[in-house]
Amino acid sequence: MFLIAIILLILILLYNIYTQRQLIKSYSGNLRELIDEADAVKRDLETLMDGAVNLSRQIIEDLDGKIQVAATNQAQQVEVKDNYQEAAEKQEQDKQVAAAYLAQIDAEKSSPMVQEQEPDYFVMHPYIAVKTLYNNGLTVTEIAKTLGRGQGEVKLILNLCTKKKAI
């Protein structure tokens, strides 16, 4: 009987070892599947990271391009503003020259004792000089010779003067 008890104990022990071995195989299989899934997730994350890095580079390149365009536009706006200011200053100078010339003419007309002095037409704006000389009775040829300009230019300026009056 004692022998039967020992055999029975050995059988129970063998059964326990067998079931534990089956559990270990099952757990190791599950662990292997989990490791394979983790590797797949890792590959997916690496692919996503590569895509994000590429997208970031593209966004940076686009922004750099837009910054360069904005800087170019700003430089062009500054240049246009400078040109406008220069033109306004030139126009103001021309107005001052014309006003000084008209004041000089008025002063000469009001004082008969003063000798008439020839104004400096080369300092004046061509538009003003041509108009003034024409109003004083000079012909196109005489105006061209006086100012050292072509007759076509003088005719063009006179045409512009008359068109401006018509409007």
Image (cartoon, rainbow, N blue to C red):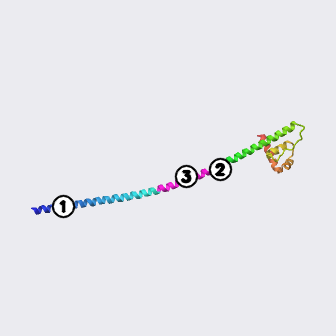
Residue 26 position within the rendered picture, expressed as x and y whole percent measured from the top left: 28, 59
Compared to 50, does 119 lie above or below? above
Q: Residue at x 25, y 60 (%)?
A: 22
Between discs 1 and 2, the one toward the N terminus = 1
Residue annotated with mark 2: 76
Q: Which residue, given by chain and number where applicable, does mark 3 sit on? A: 63
Q: Residue furthest top?
A: 110
| Horizontal relation, residue 12 to residue 61: left or right | left
- Amino acid at the residue labelled 2: Gln
Residue on which the image places disc 1? 13
Helix, strand or loop for disc 1: helix
Q: Residues under labels 1 and 2: Cα distance?
A: 93 Å
| Place of residue 77 in the rendered image (x, y in percent of width and height, measured from the top left) | 65, 48
What x and y, as percent, mark residue 10? 16, 62
Q: How crowded is mark 2: few (under 14 residues within 10 Å), some or many (20 or more)?
A: few
Mark 1 or mark 3, earlier in chain = 1
Residue type indicated by callout 3: Leu
Name the quadrant of the N terminus. bottom left
Give whichever of discs 3 and 2 has the lower sequence position: 3
| Observer-nearest of 156 and 98 | 98
In the structure shown, which secondary structural element does the residue marked by tag 2 occupy? helix
Residue shown at 29% from the left, 58% from the top? 27
160 left or right, relative to 39? right
Q: What stretch is highlighted in magenta?
A: 51-73
In the rendered image, residue 61, in percent from the top left (x then y), is placed at 54, 55
Local crowd at mark 1 within 10 Å, few (<14), some, or many (≥20)?
few
